[in-house]
Every structure is written in structure tokens, then in C-alpha cells.
Amino acid sequence: MSAGIHRIVILTGAGISAESGIDTFRSAGGLWEQHRIEDVATPEGFARDPDLVLGFYDMRRAALEKVEPNPAHAALARLEQEFAGELLLVTQNVDDLHERGGSAKVLHMHGELKSALCTSCDMRSPWLGTMLDRPPCPVCQARTLRPDVVWFGEMPYRMDRIYAALERCDLLVSIGTSGAVYPAAGFVQEARASGARTLELNLEPSEGSRLFHESRLGPASVLVPEWVDEVLSRAG
């Protein structure tokens, strides 16, 4: 698969973090099951009940401290370090497991849990603590912080860069995604329209599996290291 591959775009979703113990939208008994998405992951929900939303994301941020990167994260970090061509790692996840797994160049299209956005001055700041007690913005001191997370109905970050990379890539690899959330669900069609090969690595078939040239099913912690070994061995 790596013959003639010089520019790779990798898209990761909830499935790669689920193996580290982070709840997905659909996981039974998890944080998301206890709340309606409309209440905790939309601008309207935040306007209605900011305490509920801030408390929810405080819990999610705290939960990050209890999980660790898995072999899939480590394998992608190894690929970043050893692949001689261009590599763009785009994640829909708001956790920091890619970075903690060793990846240095990660584009978080849906924002980051460990970042705060001030709705008064529009500045972003690294954030590890709580927001429920309305701490001041480190930049302007206004007590108007919100999670720096892209909610439903908001535009994902850095889409221009992502689409430019999709137009140029030789290979798009989608890892642990449901294929249900746009615009990320449309990346496979964008890549194919530009002539790229497309590969899905997923625990089970996604809603967009039929659009990929190849789909490999199994745990990300198994499939991703195997695929990285394949790419680097052929490149060498």
C-alpha cells in the first residue's frame, strides 16, 4: 500500500480513544448516555444551562487524567517520526492522547478539552482546571470562558488546511470513525476525487465503509501498528 505514497492524511475518531477507556457517544453507561447531546454539546444548550455544560466538560477533562495512550497512538507517533514523506494527522477527538502518545503535529478539528475559549476576547488559553466556578480569562480577565470544543452547529477548525491536504494526498487513512459526522464523513469522497487511495481501519464497518478502497476491521490497537509496520517496511 505504501508504494508511491508520499503524502498521507490520517483522520482519527472516537474509536482510537475508546480503547484507552474514553467514552464515545454510543458507549453504554458512559458520560454521554447520562446527558442529551443537545443539552451539553450545542451552543443552544450552553445558552440554556451553562452550569450543566461547564460541569460536564469539567468531568470530561478530569477523566483524561485516568487514561493513557494505547498502542495505536504510539504507532502513529512512530509513523510521524520515521515516514520520509508528508503526514497530516487530523483528529476529531478533543483528548490529548495523540500528543501524550508522542505525536507532535496534531490538528484538532473539533478543539481540545485542555483549552479554554473566551467569548469576550476570542482568545484561547491552555486549561487544566475547572470552569464551573467562572474563573477569569487569563488574557482579558472576563469571566466568560467556555470549553474550546466545537459543538454541533459550529464550524470545525482549520478546514482550509485539511481540504488542501486532501487535494494533495496520495493516501487517506480513517481510523476509528463512525462515518456519521460531517464534514469529516465526507473526507473520503474528497480524497478519492483527487485520486488518492483510501483505507479504513475500524472496529466494525462504518456508515461510509463502502466508499473506501479497502476496509480492515479490528481493534485500532492491533490494526494501526500493523499498518504502520507495513508502510515503513515498504518505504524502506
Image (cartoon, rainbow, N blue to C red):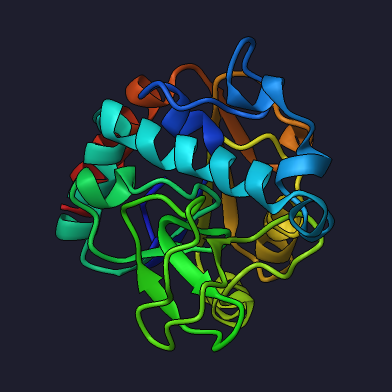
Residue shown at 24%/55% (left/top)? 103
How many numbered discs, if any? 0
- Residue 225 vertical placement versus 144 (above, below): above
The quadrant where residue 71 appears? top left
In the drawing, does residue 27 fall left or right of residue 153? left
Q: Residue at x 43, y 32 (%)?
A: 17
Could you say where residue 4 lies in the image, as x and y percent from the top left?
A: 39, 62
Q: Which residue is found at the position 61% from the left and 37% from the top?
A: 177
Q: Among all residues in the image, which is located at the extreme front?
A: 133
Instruction: State the image coordinates of residue 126 (x, y, percent, origin top left).
Output: 33, 67
Query: Relative to 179, does residue 182 appear above or below in the rendering?
Result: below
Is 16 in front, or is 223? 16
Residue found at the very far top of the displayed protein: 29
Above-or-below relation of 14 to 194: above
Residue 28 image point, x, y percent: 64, 10
Front one among 197 and 120: 120
Above or below — where is 143 with respect to 29?
A: below
Residue shown at the point (71%, 47%) measured from the top left: 41
The spot of residue 68 in percent (x, y) is 25, 30
Decide if residue 180 is in sight here. Answer: no
Could you say which quadrant of the image residue 80 lies in?
bottom left
Give the position of the N terminus as an image quadrant.
top left
Q: From the viewer's perspective, tell me whether residue 161 is left or right of residue 97.
A: right
In this rendering, would 217 be left or right of 179? left
